[in-house]
Image: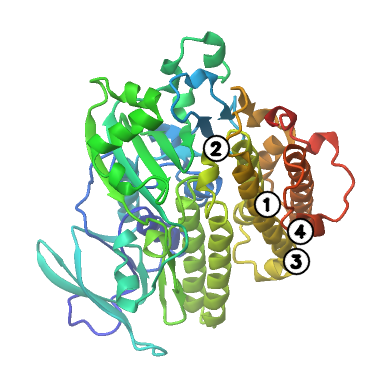
Amino acid sequence: MDGAAPGNDIDVLIIGGGLAGLTLALQLRQRDPALRVAVLERKAHPVPEAAHKVGESTVEIGAHYLADVLGLRGHLETRQIRKFGFRFFFSDGRQDIDRCTEVGVSRLLPTPSWQIDRGRFENFLGVQARALGVRFHDGAVVREIGMAVSGSDAPHAVTFTQPGGERTLRARWLVDASGRAGLLKRKLGLAQANDHDVNAAWWRVDGCVDPNLWSEDPAWIQRCTPPDRWRSTNHMCGPGYWFWLIPLASGAHSLGIVCDAKMHPLETMNTHAKAMDWLRAHQPRVAAALSGGEHALRDFLFLRHFSYGCRQVFSADRWALTGEAGLFLDPFYSPGTDFIAIANTYICDLIEKDRAGQSFAPYADLYQQLYFSFYENTLTLYQGQYPLFGDSQVMPVKVIWDYTFYWALLGPLFFGRRMTDVAMFGRLRPDFAEAGMLNRAMQALLREWGERNDGRAPPPGRLLDQYGIDWFHEMNRALNDVLDDDAFARRIGDNLARMRWLATEILAQARRVHAGIDAHGLDGLLGQPDPPPPSLAPPWYADAA
């Protein structure tokens, strides 16, 4: 298999051996053990644990992909940390975290997710890939990418160097999973900006940063069972920003500031010293907790304009992009692994169709349209919404809506293994169109509600317990239901009805607070539905007024 070998050396060549590339390699080999797969990874393995990468927190789709689609549940349960859900504190400028509004679950919801130590996990994935027969070349630096002539059956060729010298591999399929380096994206000129202007600075420290140590109030500590707030992805929220705390199984804690570029310039936090000064001003209780000697700094990094799109991710010319090599949204709801799972699933299906001699080009176009629609709909949850993040009245409502939107449509599609079910997408097209319109109108309503709230006194601190919302709990559990086609279509219809009821309730709540607020088209979308049954009405809405 030297550089002069004729034809294809392998079937699929993946550039990048991080989370996206290695999971794709595993998925391909699991689905077709005869498939010849190679991975080129710049870093030598094993990599350090607590690797400095975004994507440590998983949510339901990504967690299901890792645990059940790839069969890695055993590692996740024994070598990573079971996540205690998302948690949000509206704590800008506050020391008394136990008197701030807190949004989260008091107990674990039925469908699990995990906090991922990326270094530990990618080392594990590398071992698993080699065990499955993947040719994993670590310490490999890509020097040249030669694309096959469009429309031809010729192979792609990639030249790379390792300590042993230079090699060239020829492959029928080429997949870019090189992360933000975007090697294929840069070569093909596929980069595309979006209108979400946000920056981030993040770092790792030794030890566990436990929010329960920030209070001596036993009642507050015991609001969660068990009282393991440290296992959550904790969001410390304020106007225009949020700060994350994510525990890592190797004994470190990941910390990060994510902010609207106009409201909090990156220059105020682009060194560790500046970031700590920023924390002292905006999250003083967190800053105080990090000042002890037990939380020594491990590393520090910042990123400007981290959110971006891509002009194309799947091609009939047998190439594709996955993970951050393609597009990246925002870490607020941790969608990164979800989009890896979705892209990898589409790539596997395209390669299978090609291997079977089927015409896959129309599917490449269709899957890309779907993938971009998922991206664009998810982007609406973040775009222009950062000024809301400090509003302890509106944000709890937004969090419930955003979760509901996620669990109503995209979640069931992935859990139900229907991402490539073209007939089902056609059948449900009107439902998806209506849900998208509802969501866009709701995001505009929430944005105006927050703008009108400017200067209002925040409500008193309390726990808004998502676990106690029966229908919300049930939507999370129902992701795991196995349904035939008709039952699945009914489930999506029922979920859309739930979105309508929730939108009706939120609009009514917004009008109770601001009588003249614009409905942003919701009146027309909702018509005049009957009042929602009590089981659908979130029990804490009146308290949030």
Q: Position of residue 273 (x, y in %)?
A: 23, 35
Give me the C-alpha separation between circle 1 and circle 3. 18 Å
The C terminus lies in which quarter of the figure? top right
Instruction: Tell me which corner region of the image, top left, top right, bottom left or bottom right, holds residue 289.
Output: top left
Amino acid type for the residue under numbered disc 3: Pro
Q: Are marks 2 and 1 in contact (CB under 8 Å)?
A: no
Residue under the image location 73 percent in, 64 percent down: 428
Q: Residues within 10 Å of mark 1 (few under 14, many from 20)?
A: many
Callout in the foreground (2, 3): 3
Secondary structure under tag 3 reads helix
**First in sequence: mark 3 or mark 4?**
3
- Judge left or right: residue 420 versus residue 524: left
How many numbered marks, from 0 up? 4
- Please tell me the numbered disc located at residue 430: 3
- The residue closer to the viewer here, 460 or 493, is 460
Give me the C-alpha separation between circle 2 and circle 3. 31 Å
Residue under the image location 60 percent in, 29 percent down: 457
